[in-house]
Structures are given as C-alpha cells and as structure tokens.
Amino acid sequence: MPLDATPSVVLKPLSFVSAFHEVRPLNPAYVERLRQKVRAIGVKPYPLSVTPAGLLFGGRHRYEAFKAEGITECLMHISEPASLDREAIELNRASEDALPMTFVDYAEMVWRKQAAGVTQKAIADELGWSSQKTNDYANLKRIAPEAWEVVSATLREMAETTTGEVAETKSATADFSERLLREITALAAHQQLDLVQDLAAGRINKNKFRAQAEAYRTRNAIQGWVRDQLGDIDPEIIDEAAAEVARGAYDAEWKAFAEQGTDLAKLNRLVEAARARFAKKHSLILIQGDFHEEIAKLGDASVDAVITDPPYRISTDRIYRLASQADWNKNFGAWDNQPEGEFLADIRRWAEAFFRVMKPGASGFMFVGEPYLNIAQALFDAAGFEIKGSFFWCRSNPGTSVTKADFMPAMDHAIQFVKPGARRTFNYPGEPEGFNWFQSPICGGHERLKTPKGETLHPTQKPEAVIRHLMDLISLPGDLVLDGFMGTGTTGKVARDTGRRFIGIEQDAGFFAAAKARVES
C-alpha cells in the first residue's frame, strides 16, 4: 500500500498503542521469526491497524517484533471498524507477514464471544459467516481441553514453519481440520486424546482416525446400553463389563441390531454374566435413601419380584384419650401424611419405577390402604402392568375398636401386578392357601421390634408369615426380590431365610438401622 494512499495511514510512535484487541493468542515463536526478518530486510511499509483510541486490532505479532527490536515508530492505519474481529480476520488474510489463522483461532474466538454472552446468530452476523459455520466452530468446545491443546500445538508448530495461506491444514505430521474433529466431539475425553495424539504423531492417517472414532462411538453406545441394563450396581462389575465391550467383540452384533433389529444374544449373555457375578458378591443389598432417587440407579428389567408396603396415607393428628389405657396416637409421622394430590402422584411414580426395573413376567404385591385400592390398581394398569386382582391379609387378632363407632379394620389390602412379556412365576399352593386371602395374627412377641423404651418401633410392621406366603407364591430361591419401602426389614429377612436375593430401600434412618441389624444378623 503506498504511504500516501489515504490520510488515515500515518507514522505514529509505538507508544500510541495503549491496548490490544485479542483475536487469538500471541505466538512467541512467530514473533521471533518476524524479528529475524526485520533484522534482515528492515521494516516493511505494511501498517499496524489501530483505532483512534489506540486499540491495536491488526498486526500484534509485528508490534511485538518492532518493540523487541527497539523500533520506536511505524506506520499505523487509524480506523474504527464496526467489527474488530471481522476486520482482524480480513487483515490477516491480506497480509503476507501475518501469522495465518487456523480453525483453532476461529473456534476459540467463537468460544470467547459466547462466554461473553454473545449469541451464535450475533456472531455469525458480525463475522459474515453462515449459522452452520458458526455452530460448527461452537461445537468444537465439546473436545476435551487436553485433546484440544494437542490440536492447537500441532497447528501452531505447522504455522511457525510455513507462510502464505492458512494451513487448515495438510502437512507431513497431521491432517487436522474442523470437519475431521467433528467426528470426536461426542467421544469420551480419553478417547479424544488418544486419537488426536496418534494423528499428530503420524501413527494413523485421517481415514484410520475416522474408523477408530466410529468404533469408539459404537462401543460407547453399547456400554451405555449395558449400564442401563445393570443399573448403578457394583462399579467394579460394571467396569469389567465395559472393558469387555471395549475389546470390540460386540461391535458387529450391535450394528446388526441397529440396522436390522436382530437379537442381542451375545450382549444379553454378557449382562446376565455380570448380574450373576453381582448376585454372588451381593446377595443382600440394603440402601438408605429416597425411593425415587435410589430405584433410578437399578438396572432395567433386573428384578424378579416386588413385595413392598409403602405408606398408606392413614395418619391423622387425632389423639384418643382412653380411660383405662395409654393414649392412642394415630399420627405415624410426615412419611404417612402427604397431601392427597402428592400421594396419588407418588403411586403413579412407584408404578412406573417398578415397571422399569421388573423383568418381563415378574410379579409383585404392594400393600395399600383400602381407600386407594382401586386407584392404585388403575395407576399400575396405566403404567403397563397386568392387574391380577387383590390380596387380603386377614388379622386373626385385630384388637378391639377404640371408639366403638365404626367397624374395626381386620384386613390389609394389597394389589397383585405382573409385567407382561414372559411367563410368570406363580407357585399355586392348593386350597385354601391358593385363595386371595391369608390369615395370621398381627406382628407380636419377639418378632415385633421395639425401641429401647419398649415402645413399638414401626406402627405397621408386617408379620413374617404374611410376607413368606407372598414370596413363596411369586418367586423361587435365587430370585432377586425388591422392597422399595423396606421399613424394619421383614421382606429382607424372609428373602434371606428362603434363599432369595434382596434389595431393600428405606429412607427413615431409625427404621433402616433396625432393618440392617435384622437382615444382616
């Protein structure tokens, strides 16, 4: 450009520059190259680009080289562009002394703008890019920092040894491009790092890079499926299964399943083998925590039977003052006194959670208060279960009515449900045991758990005889039985005594401690 081409190109002291608009990181090696060039041929008449306020937005590497060489003044093009970034990119393309910008520079520019709250649309409009191009650069943020640093360092090294147009980039050492890196954005960090290191070192070419990225994606999908089947069980067992998948032995079966809907016979055997190892290592699992949070950690179709006794919502604040005996308090606690809308929503969520974790053909019994018997059946039916009717535990010693104003309840109600899809276990015992009712005394004697003060620990503890009857009906020794509302552990103790495996969930710390002592003793 002639020195007198425009009055905006003027000779200015280097000290006129008071700040820098960073388009990309400074490259010290390239500054050194420019210093050598200045020493060899002097300062070329290509101006720095600076705003009237002294903000440098074009020629930062030349500025640093001039400063390092003791040059105190140079030509500067004074202007105030609408977009400093767009102008800087155009200046870079036009200058023979500029360090070529790569897709790494463009991507990092997009990330900085997004971090400052600028939308992708605004970035595209400012830089004159398509929305797709901007989105492609933004998505490269999904590459792990360690892998990105390998890419960035490789391109910096290439740029330091080449001149002219941007090398986006083909070289003797690597074949990185924005398009190629899209192949790895969904991969795990260690997979991304392995691939970019291999490509940067020349151990693989871009075709091998793409093939290995596809293999990683396939195995990640398989590992996700396996984890869904196994749930949040023993991490060591899950890691063993994941390592087996990583060998690649299941790739072909998975692709055939995805493309043709074929069976996953080998993968199902892998899952069953992992479950068998888990069962051998953990036959009784007791979990303290919220039902909804903890059951979400269990694997799909992993449970053989459900026997559970959740809150009935029968608590009241009423206290009966009795003349000849202690007061009778019907407030069992907040766990049994939800607002009705929340309680009905919970029943629906219980049904959906049980349906997910139960195997096809698995059966369950859930005790429920009489006012909600039909509602519970309808909600479990809506979740996909076959409803097999009701079961009644008839208390042979229900006690006497306190108020003598109503019938004395002498039955507890349960719904029976089956997940369709396979033949169910139902061990018909003959009659009368095969009727839909079972009679036994209420829980008492040494079986009834007490507090240190001798008070009843749990107000609705079920007798072992009732739970044993139900367990014998719908499960076999070795089966995995789930109780999502374990209470003081009756279902767990019966499972242990009859050779079943067991998972129990209980939120209350006091009940859980009693269940743990009872089941694990």
Image: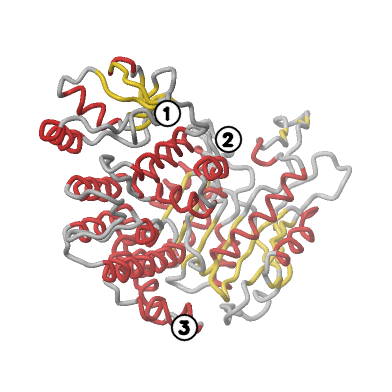
- In which quadrant of the rendered image does the N terminus lie? top left
Secondary structure of the residue carrying numbered label 3? loop
Q: Amino acid at mark 3?
A: Asp
Relative to residue 479, is residue 50 depicted above or below? above
Q: Amino acid at mark 1?
A: Thr
Q: Which mark is residue 263?
A: 3
Relative to residue 416, is residue 483 depicted above or below? above
From the viewer's perspective, is the residue at label 2 or at label 3 nearer?
3
Q: Which mark is residue 428?
A: none
What residue do we see at 84% from left, 39% from top? Answer: 403
Instruction: Mark 2: give few (<14), some (14-19) or many (20+) Cα within 10 Å.
Output: few
Residue 521 is at least partly visible in this image = no
Q: Amino acid at mark 2?
A: Glu
Q: Which mark is residue 455?
A: 2
From the viewer's perspective, is the residue at label 2 or at label 1 nearer?
1
- Image coordinates of residue 345 in percent, x first then y, are 71, 50
- Image coordinates of residue 16 in percent, x first then y, are 33, 16
Viewer-closest of 409 and 93: 93
From the viewer's perspective, is the residue at label 1 or at label 3 nearer?
1
- Image coordinates of residue 4 in percent, x first then y, are 37, 28
Task: Give the labeled residue for mark 1.
Answer: 6
